[in-house]
Image (cartoon, helix red, strand yellow):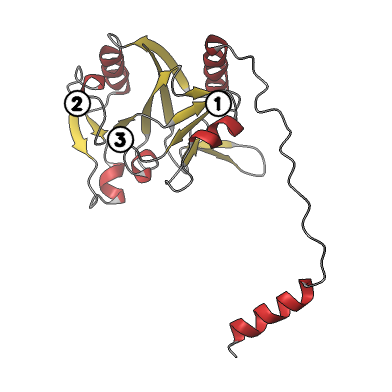
Amino acid sequence: MSSRDAILARVRAAVGDAPPAPAVLRDYLPSHTPDDPAAVVDLLHENLADYRALVHRTDAAGVGPLVAGLLAARGARSVLVPDGLPPRWTAATDCERIEDTAGATAAQLDAVDSVVTGCALAIAETGTLVLDAGPGQGRRRITLVPDHHICVVRVPDQVVASVPQAVRRLDPRRPLTWISGPSATSDIELDRVEGVHGPRTLEVVLLSG
């Protein structure tokens, strides 16, 4: 008998007479927000801003000029564009476009000025963006290394009110990245430092239509 088998046998013997685990109650409210798409989007906007994300609203005709303006205001000379990102989102910018390649190193990604992505969905009650490496989102690392991230959220289709609603729509087998505002941490004296574990600046474009 291997050490592993011996340990598992002792565990089984120890819990053999234990009562069955109680059923998990899931009778909690799935959401604390009224079922009003406009109100849910407004709540998302409010909570994103509360987390120090910069929030912008536009429609299909304005998304390209808006993204170009945000990149210009940032002084970006290069922008990382993941595969599957709608071309019109970055069509108006003069920035050099950098592709999301498997061989890109952390140093190469750090040299990119900005990244533009879509998302899987956004959660209004927590002001959270969720990316799952789907089309237009790229690998997780492209949203963790560059210092400036512009994330486009289609509203209201990609917006849910609560975490339970989000979990029902997400595939747990995909690499999920949950983002609530710019990356930040605080030391014991509560001095806040941004850009430690991800982008220092997060801009969210709420795209309607």
In what element is the residue under mark 1? loop
**Label whose residue precedes the other's in the sequence (1 or 2):** 2
Q: Is 192 or 130 nearer to us in this picture?
A: 130
CA distance separating discs 3 and 1: 22 Å
Q: Residue at x 75, y 41 (%)?
A: 25
Q: CA distance from mark 1 to mark 2?
A: 29 Å
Percent from the top left, x then y, of residue 182?
A: 48, 32
Residue at which label 1 appears: 127
> Is mark 1 in CB contact (under 8 Å) with mark 2?
no
Question: Mark 1: few, some, or many residues within 10 Å (few <14, many ≥20)?
Answer: many
Observer-nearest of 18 and 149: 18
Three-letter code for the amino acid on which mark 2 is drawn:
Cys
Tell which tag, 3 or 1, sits nearer the viewer. 3
**Contact flag, marks 2 and 3 (Cβ < 8 Å):** no
Is 58 drawn above or below residue 116 in the view shown? above
Name the residue: 18% across, 32% down: 97
Query: Dot 2 corresponds to which residue?
Result: 95
Q: Which residue is mark 3?
A: 135
